[in-house]
Amino acid sequence: MSTATYLRTADVPLARLRPFPGNAKRGNVPTILESLCRTGQYRSLVVRQGDGDELTTLAGNHTAQAIAAHGPGDCGLNVTVDGEQRPCGLCLNAPWEPVARCEIVTCDDATAKRINLVDNRAADQGDYDERALAALIAGMDGDLAGTGYSDADLQDLLAPVDLDADVDAYEPPARPAAATRPPADLPPGPAPGEPAPPAPDGHATVLLTYTTAEHDEVAAHMAAARNALPTAGTPVVVLHALRTLTATLNARDAARDNLAVDELLAVAGVAA
């Protein structure tokens, strides 16, 4: 049998579930438990029925561990949502024996391993639209319990991204003329083959190397950033340039070949 065949959905006592042998994933059980207590079990475990009554968890092993960590009985946890007290999403603050909602399937050994592997791997291979993620988190109005995120995570996401910047509606001005050399107030870098001077205390040196063909474009972008931040020192200008690159890669329309310099600064949240 090279595919999994669905049998039924059932609430299964946790004591009957066997963890997948050799499961390589190491999940964040406390985060999952916090989610379960806040929102309940919103996703079923995928469980393989073997010979007799044997039930093996293929996907959701860490959810099972989180339910086990909650344990039987009333955990005493409740939360306030919109001024209303709500009970734990698992035990409902009542006598309770740990159970898990399961989608029960049959399959051969190779398929069982394949399901376990892809369930763990697929999440690793995903990515985020950080602007959309920041907007979702910000839309929670500070109530981040059970989301896996914190206020600090939101601040990290907002640092390089201006949620109010409307990139698609932005009409970029003409590109500034390419500079042939860095602004005069930038200190010269080390000569080729010479080491960079030591950084002052509390600072670190970052060496950025460009080809000759890239030099004028880099200088033009640095000049635009310096014009937008006239009182900033060179490290701040470079930092905003890096944030600009990150924001652009995450936010721009894939169909567009490039963005104007001033538009890049707007995407990065730097007001010109």
Image: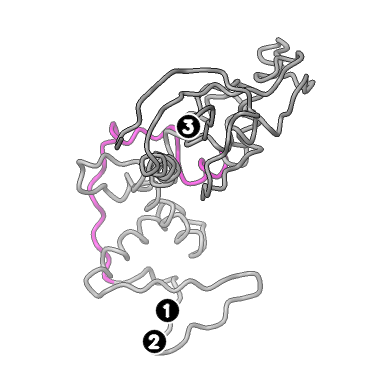
For badge 3, the amino acid type reads Asp
Q: Is residue 191 left or right of residue 150?
A: left
Residue furthest to the bottom in view is 193
Give the residue displayed 59% in from the left and 24% down from the top.
100
| Callout 2 amino acid | Ala
Q: Mark 1, residues whose alpha carbon is within 10 Å: few (<14), some, or many (≥20)?
A: few
Which x, y percent locates residue 211? 27, 74
In percent of width and height, residue 215 lies at 28, 70
Residue 15 in magenta stretch: no
Q: Sequence order check: which comes first, mark 3 or mark 1?
A: 3
As helix, strand or loop, the secondary structure at mark 3 comes to loop
| Camera-side residue of 92 and 163 | 92
Q: Which residue is mark 2?
A: 191
Amino acid type indicated by mark 1: Pro
Q: Nearer the viewer, mark 3 or mark 2?
A: 3
Q: Distance of mark 3 from mark 1, alpha carbons?
A: 74 Å
